[in-house]
Amino acid sequence: MSVDTPRRIVLLRHAKADWPQVSDHERPLAERGRQDAPVAGRKLADSGIGFDLAICSTAARTRETWKLAVHELPRRPKTVYEERVYEASPGELIAVLNEVQDDFSDIILIGHNPGVQGLADVLAGSSEGDAQVRMNRRGFPTSAFAILSYTGSWKGLEPGTATLLDYWAPHE
């Protein structure tokens, strides 16, 4: 695959988590999260993106979100559970994406706020339609996702090099 191939990056925030007496890393989804995650998966399926790779935080709530969402997709991509995504800053998330092999064109990253929203803001040098306005108005609630496009090698991904194509949030 050429480095000039258009690529798509989807940034998905985990679904609504519960607050039991466990460490933050081990927090499971709340009932609303278990309902919203498959809805997000169906919306992702409707986007028509055939994901090649999923990079998911190792936190329980992100793993559970992905498990529920991926069942709604037409095909399951290769999934990598990456502990660096947990509590990562936008810069740390860019470093993870810079390591993706150029064989992968469409990827999804399942992570946490404020890193996921910050990454969407930092990467988007431009926006199509009202995606940026809607994302700025809604923030990045649980189960929300942003779809960005980028052309170039993953090693070259940096702030301002992507276009925000779409944004979706449940209960919008």
Image (cartoon, rainbow, N blue to C red):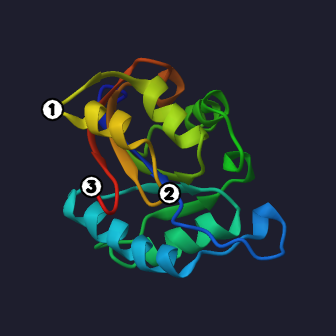
Residue type, mark 3 in image: Ile
Q: Position of residue 160 (x, y in %)?
A: 41, 17
Neighbour tally class for label 1: few under 14, some 14-19, many 20 plus, Cα within 10 Å = few
What secondary structure is marked by label 3? Answer: loop
Q: Assign the C terminus to one quadrant of the image.
A: bottom left
Inspect this view and state whether residue 153 appears: no
From the viewer's perspective, tell me whether residue 28 is left or right of residue 122.
right
Residue type, mark 1 in image: Gly
Asked if 117 appears above or below 85 in the picture, the reply is: above
Which residue has dot 3 on it? 49
Q: Nearer the viewer, residue 81 or 120?
A: 120
Q: Residue at image x 27%, y 32%?
A: 133
Which residue has dot 2 on it? 54
- Tell which circle, 2 or 3, labels the residue nearer the N-terminal end: 3
- Tell which circle, 3 or 1, labels the residue nearer the N-terminal end: 3
Which residue has dot 1 on it? 129
